Image (tube, helix red, strand yellow):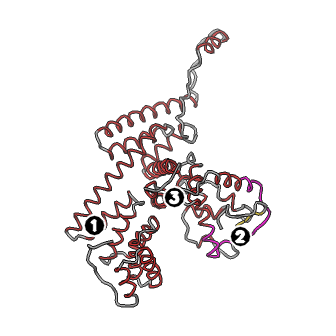
Amino acid sequence: MRLGNGSATQQERIPHLRPGVDPAGLSLTPAEGYLLSRIDGTTPWTLLRSIGGIGPDEVDRCLERWVAEGVVTVVVSAAAPGAAAVLDSSHARSGDTDPSLDIPVEVQLRILDFEARLESPYHEILGVARDADRKILRKAYFALSRELHPDRFFRRNTGSFGKRLERIFGKIVEAYELLSDPTARAEIERSLAAAGGSTPSAETVQPAETAQPAEAAAEAAQQKPAAGPRVPRRPHVFSLHSRVLRDRKARAKRFFEAGMASHAAGRWVEAAGSVRLAIAFDPWNAIYKEHFVAVQRRAQDERAQRLLKEAESALELRDFKVALRAFDDAIQLRPHDAELLHRAAKLAWMTGGDLRQAKEWAMAAVEIDPKQGGHHRLLGQVYQAAGLEANARRELEAALALDASDEEARTALREIGGRPLGLRWLGGKR
């Protein structure tokens, strides 16, 4: 039911809440609740995709799921004003795609659509409500990281989309890190309040008191009437805002300089924290943001490597609980890493740990790298341990279709319907 796939330009789909459905009884995220509140029986699907607070693809996914669950029905009617323009812009972007690349055309369109709104407010970039909490932010970041991280397309022919993915993921990191840090988030709000609520853009905002050219200043001085007795005046609100902004920009500069000093010394985590605060005090400065993305990614890699060493040490001591916790923390930093997800899922499954968590990790690994037979095999084994034999068979057969020599998958298929598998050795191939 996605837009732009053969939809008629003269007709429009209007979502309606099905009679008898009580929205209060549904389990919804704040972003989903906001979207559901916009379904009024008159707003077309195309315009719902352009509302603030939730991304277009997420709108599609929510609406399609609600239609399948019987929460929403869709009525086809004459196109609403503006709908054709939305469709036309989508078709125009399709001209920038290249079928010869190793990225599916539908993914290329998704990248182009995302790139077109990189200057949106941070919460809109992540596709969440403005007041989203850290848990919702992390969930959104995980989903976007798995979908759009440049490493997902490593060693593929990506053409111009490689640089687009770098820009997109940099903005995703920026949005997530600044919104999920309570201190940075609060300072950004103060900066915007001091500027009268204006939204940061990609360009650095010039100070409010821009100097006049010399000729204009001289002309103004000649036309100025003779000065009379000085009368004390209260500071203008605009002047107060300007002064506050100057002070905040000065603090931002000091934080940035401290961050660059830490960067030069290779202290990536410390550098990322300082540059994050520089952006919080001056959210319009494009230079700070550019440096932040690079430093933050180095900081994340540094922390992830440290956590992986902790996991390896714990495995040597057969302290599986500590190893799982270290893997989980590393995944928070590298949710796009299919190999890491696979290792964590395998450990959780083999030690009889949380099968629900093992399934989520294994499913994510399959989603990121679906051509790796070992990922399908592991997901099948997790399903098998949970007693979901039909799902297990599907994944194990997929593993054998990718690698006919996978004897572990073949053995697991023969075991379906037999006794529980129990604890397994933690070594061996994937």
Is residue 309 shown above or below 279? below
> Which kind of residue does numbered mark 1 sit on?
Ala
Residue that mark 1 sits on = 323
The answer to whether residue 368 is left or right of residue 346 is: right
> Disc 3 on helix, strand or loop?
loop
Q: Residue at x 38, y 37 (%)?
A: 255
Which quadrant holds the C terminus? bottom left
Q: Contact, CB < 8 Å: mark 1 with mark 3?
A: no
Query: Which of 397/215 is in front?
Result: 397
Query: Which of 326/159 is in front?
Result: 159
Residue that mark 2 sits on = 74
Query: Which of 54/19 is in front?
Result: 54
> Which kind of residue does numbered mark 3 sit on?
Asp
Q: Examine the rendering and report whether any part of residue 54 can be seen.
A: no
Counting other residues with Cα less than 10 Å from the Cα at mark 3, is it few (<14), some (14-19), or many (20 or more)?
some
User: Which residues lie in the magenta part?
Assistant: 63-85
CA distance for labels 2 and 3: 35 Å
Counting other residues with Cα less than 10 Å from the Cα at mark 1, is it few (<14), some (14-19), or many (20 or more)?
many
Is residue 127 shown above or below 171? below
Residue that mark 3 sits on = 102
